[in-house]
Amino acid sequence: MTIVIAIDGLAGSGKGTIAKNISSFYNFPHLDSGILYRSVAYLCHKGGENVFDEKRVLKYAQNLNIEEINVDKLRTEEIDQISSKISSFSSVRESLKIFQLNFKKIHSDKSGIVIDGRDITTVIFPDAEIKFYVTASLKDRANRRFEELVLNNPKIDKKLVIKELQKRDQRDMERSVAPLKIAKDAIVIDTSDLTIEEVNIIVQREIEKVISKKE
Ligand code: DC
């Protein structure tokens, strides 16, 4: 049996780092579902789409070949905003859902997988064995996002990063399809005042509880 560890959270909350650490500690394959939305956004941008038409965006989602995408190009301010916009299209979400469900199927020989995003605990894997909801203060999240973006754009304005993050938060939480919310049975972790090591301890303690029950 493959244990699903599902992680949701706001941009910059630290969910990606948590997912990567679980993946390397337990040797569980990891899927960052944000990469899927970002890849579709990148293709739209490259294809010159300015006004987003759901049918056209869907074509990009359906024909997505993740192997062909250079992930280094996906963490820009433009892609942040476009991915947040196109993720409100229900047909696009449905198409990317298939990709995410397949991820579990192709790793059915593994004892676990870890997947992070916005709707993993609520829509994609509502029956996941372990669910985490990761959060952090706006200030801490903006600082982390700034550190990432400044690598691509040394002139980036911190105030703008905060504003754009707020816009994204609002869109992610208020969209009508699969909005980000805390699943009833999710373990909530606020990473604002915790070190990575402290977060790892909390996360591993929860995972061990589930693994020991399965044995
Ligand atoms: O996690 P991220 O910042 O890389 O995600 C980029 C965008 O994709 C984010 O603004 C919302 C969207 N997204 C989503 O709607 N559902 C997911 N499961 C993952 C990401």
Image (cartoon, rainbow, N blue to C red):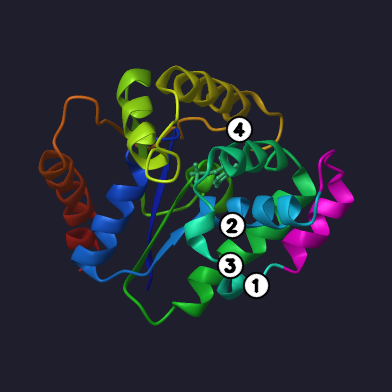
N-term-proximal mark, 2 vs 4: 2
The residue closer to the viewer here, 114 or 15, is 15
Residues at marks 1 and 2, CA–CA distance in whole angstroms = 10 Å
The residue carrying mark 2 is 36
- Looking at the rendered structure, the kind of residue marked 3 is Ile
Q: Which residues are magenta?
A: 49-63
Res 154 label: none
N-term-proximal mark, 3 vs 4: 3
- Residue 134 quadrant: top left
Is 61 included in the stretch rendered in magenta?
yes
Residue 185, percent from left and from top: 39, 37
Q: Determine the secondary structure under disc 3.
A: loop
Q: Is residue 93 visible?
A: yes
The residue closer to the viewer here, 124 or 146, is 146
The residue carrying mark 4 is 179
The residue carrying mark 1 is 65
Residue 159, percent from left and from top: 44, 17
Residue 167, percent from left and from top: 58, 22
Name the residue: 86% across, 53% down.
Answer: 56
Tell me: is circle 2 under 8 Å from ligand 1: yes
Query: Is there CB contact under 8 Å for labels 1 and 3?
Result: yes
- Looking at the rendered structure, the kind of residue marked 2 is Leu
